[in-house]
Amino acid sequence: MRVLTAAWVAFLCASFAHAQQTPVVREPGVSMRFWFVGEPMDKVMPLVRGQTPNVSRVQPTIDMKDGTVGDFDSTFLAHAEGFLETGAGAYELRLTSDDGSILKLDGQTVIDHDGLHAEVPKTAQLELKAGLHPLDLWFFQSYGGWTLRLEWKPPGASDFVVVPTSALSCQAGEVRVTAPGPKRVVRPLSRTRPGDGQPLDALNPALTVSTIRPSDFQPRVGGIAFFADGRMAITTWDAVGAVWILDGVESGDASKVKLKRFAAGLAEPLGICIVGERVFVLQKQELTELVDHDNDGVADEYKDVCSAWDVSANFHEFAFGLVEKDGWLYFNLAIAIEPGGRSTEPQVQGRGSALRVKIADGTMETVANGLRTPNGIGLGTNGDVFITDNQGDWLPSSKLLHLDKGAFYGSRSVLLEKAASLTVTPPVLWMPQNEIGNSPSNPALIPAGWGPYSGQMCHGDVTHGGIKRDVVEVVDGVWQGCIIDWTQGLECGVNRIVFGPDKALYIGGIGSTGNWGQEGKLHYGLQRLAYKGPPPFEILGMHAKTNGFEIVFTHPLAPHTGWEKENWDVQQWRYVPTEEYGGPKVDEETLAVRSVSISADRTRAFLEVDGLKPEHVVALRIVGPLVDESGAALWSTQAWYTLNRIPKSDMGFHTDAPAPAPLNVLTEPERAAGWKLLFDGKSLQGWHTYGKKSTPTGWQAVDGALARTSGGGDIATDDDYQDFELALEWKITPGGNSGIMFHVDESLGSPWESGPEMQVLDNEHHPDGHDPTTSAGSAYALYPPPRDRTHPVGMWNEARIKVKGHHVEQWLNGTLTCEYELESPEWKTLVAASKFASMPRYGQVASGKICLQDHGDAVAYRNIRVRKL
Amino acid sequence: MILGPILGPILLALLPQQPVPSPLLPVRPRDPFVFRCVLDRHPRMITAALGDDLWVAWDAQSCALYKAWQGDVKFDGPVYTSVHGPQPTIEGTDYTSGVEGSAWSTSVNGQPVACRVHYGGYRIVAGALTLEWHVTIEGGTEVVVDEMPEIVRPKELFSAEQLDDAVLGEGNQPGLRRIFEAHGLEEGMQIAVTMRTDNTVCKLGAFERERFDDVKDARGVILSTRIFSQLPMTHAQPQTGCILFFRPVAAPADATLKNGAK
């Protein structure tokens, strides 16, 4: 056979690229998805990425009013997607909604009808070209009745009519995956950030990434394997069904990678394994050996090694693989599902199984069953085989499984009533849907050379994207452990990962319609990740103890940090598999952290936790201001531990908290810099009740803090301050409100009539916290902070105000939350639009008191110091 | 019409002794021209786009030819159109289809014996396809039968006179050549492969044991006749083959549009 010339390879690549241009097959109507949020909204809010909708359907028109969607009728977001087909001419569109909506055509916003409002229309006149116009409509419903209607008046028409089905179309044949339970939105003042209540959105700083595919090579990767000499082989899940061999991938330089098609015409090859020089691929219907008899780099023979399993024509009967162990090739069979997402009834027997085939003679054995969409199999800890399975019916969330001979993993779709009496082998890890997983793919063991991560496992995810770490252990003979978000920042959703002979991690991307693919990413891709170190400050592992959890960090914690219980948020719940798709968290509760111990080297924390229950998921989120010795915040604050068993006699360590730093004292450098204390920790000297010149009532020195303990009114400094820097710490109680005002003219009735205020608030539980301009750290009612920088209620917050001339800076917990110029045109405009417009002295006092507000809630201040600038 | 006596030497000459150089191969209408996929709801199909007007599919489950047709495959499904649900189906007009039941039969010393057949894979050497069928004869002997299908056209094989004799007109219609070669047949053993040979203008090959089944309507009127023909292989003559020249069928109106390579 001929050796392929460069021109021939180029032709094949071009053919391949052409095959990738999947045509959009359309059906009438629009694709509608609904997400139940469960909290009021005042505008269309972005969803936290990667969340499966509660309801997904195609509907003929956009004309809805009241009633339930699924099982909810309020606090939801809806998204209509499709195409609007028009002729050429002037069209008028009318969007009627209650509450808000935003309509885009051809990627441009044509009607912005956002915000809380009653059922009112809004129109737009458009000059449209003939053809298909991508349509994108978002809608939110808070409470009460609701309406969403899209009408048009085509050229020549006299009245509006609902845009007819004949003018609407959408992608046909999508698998409409849904999942119950409330979804999360990104609020403007969110306490979350990527890696903290949201998925990561960037590459882990310990890693480097390079794209190793030529730009015109767009593989949807179904499998990756390596020859011993470093050549990579991949299979592609596409119309060509190919095996490609890539030489030079270890360079990390796509321009140095040589590409050659080794085989083609395979049916959805979703696994490849190279044993010695033998190449095995897993097709939907067959385990095949590809043999290159004449060594020209192209397979001549497609040998049926084993096809002993049953298979039907159902599109979802994938075969996922492929891993070799002890002379056997292991792989998984998916069950059949209907395009709507429900399992097919009846199923072909033997589906939903993990199988193995002996390489020597092709004999096949069933190893385990009770799987659904097990798109991941790999060697992990101890060299054992691990499997991932995707959420669906009987799978309330995706999971990682340890392959055990004879195990039943819980999906009843094949065995039906016979399965009810079987003992379910619990997952090593539950992957709470949308929080840390959605469509997990194959696991792998992190090899030596990857710093502290070596020896842990990791896996990719097609829809949630990125790579997660799996830190597993055996407790009482049962596998369990935690899952941690590790990295994003890749070009595609991740379908396959393999560590190459050069120890680099190679990832293959994939994606399709129907919520299988990472939002905003390519549906193909091939990249190389290398460990450069050092690791960022992050959770290395979470380990179960009899009385709590030991948390291991990559860096030592900063001295004196982590000890407060408020740093650690611990939630617990369990899952109940049912025949419904997915499943909610059951018996969800917050667990009390009884005590915190930090190891002497400060790399480990032990949380003594009350109320732990076996067969539950325990979610840890570090909500406090933990930093390492360099002051770096955590890369990722969360870990999800699957607590199948509580260790019987493995208590966590205990250490005593260090003595607290002295309060209300100035250091020598501070004194030298001109700082003076405004509170000595014992008395209220230097303060008086606003407007009365008397010793404050309702405020007391309590445990070294100036605390508002009962109603007594605002308090003011005895001295006036013009240009100054004020630093203090504040602690609010749940739902509490207070404030720090400056340049206050005490002759007026209230300090806020003259003094600008830095807000002190429990953002989460006080209504003012829902509006950024009145949230903690804001210049009250004028300037918002960029995001919620407060520590959890019950912890101290560091605030700082600098005033020099008209220039004002407000800092909260080390972040500049507001910076503005008094008397600037912008400031005047904002004041004029605020409640202060009617207060002529507001912001007009050049020198005045500093006041602490009594807003009727308990609040405390300490370490209050000031210096004149 | 069977042209065995006249054209038998031509057939034998066509038996591939060596891989044929690529430039002599027909232009394939699809890359890859051999592929596996669900087809017409059968999950284990092997399809070969042998020529622009001849596609052939075998079922690896039943180990038999499924259909030969003019047209193409409607590639539908996740990897082709991103649509979840449908799978590829044949589009076009059938030249022939497979037999009901097993296409394979075996005998030892003239006595019929049972056999099991399974698909062993395929090879593509020098651009030509070879399918591998493993026939296990009662008693345990496993015989590997290679099947080498190819498209041929009468005008490439016959003179104008011969074309005229065989009513092959201009000689452009596609012919399906199927060469079989058995490996491991012992003395006295015979393997025969059965195929439909109706709907042909002419056929050549060492056919035996032909069976004619009339297809009748409810009133008993004969609508058509199905012809089932066998090609035997023996220890002494392990190689056999045939060429079926099909009656012309109507091409799908949009066949050219659907296969960009055409």
Image: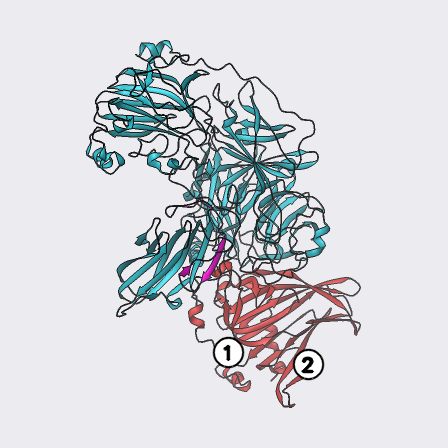
Find residue A265 and report its image quarter: bottom right
Query: The disc labelled 2 sits on which kind of residue?
Result: Glu
Q: Judge from the rendering whether residue A86 lies leftward or rightward of residue A615; answer left or right.
A: left
Q: Label 1 marks which chain's residue?
A: B
Residue linked to disc 1: B173
* Image location of residue B67, percent across then percent down: 58, 72
- Residue visible at 34% across and 48% down? A115
Q: Judge from the rendering whether residue A462 lies leftward or rightward of residue A367; answer left or right.
A: left
As helix, strand or loop, the secondary structure at mark 2 comes to strand
Q: Mark 2 and mark 1: span between their CA atoms?
A: 24 Å
Span of residues in magenta: A38-67
Q: Colour of chain A?
A: cyan
Residue linked to disc 2: B210
As helix, strand or loop, the secondary structure at mark 1 comes to loop
* Image location of residue A459, percent across then percent down: 55, 41
Query: The disc labelled 1 sits on which kind of residue?
Result: Gln
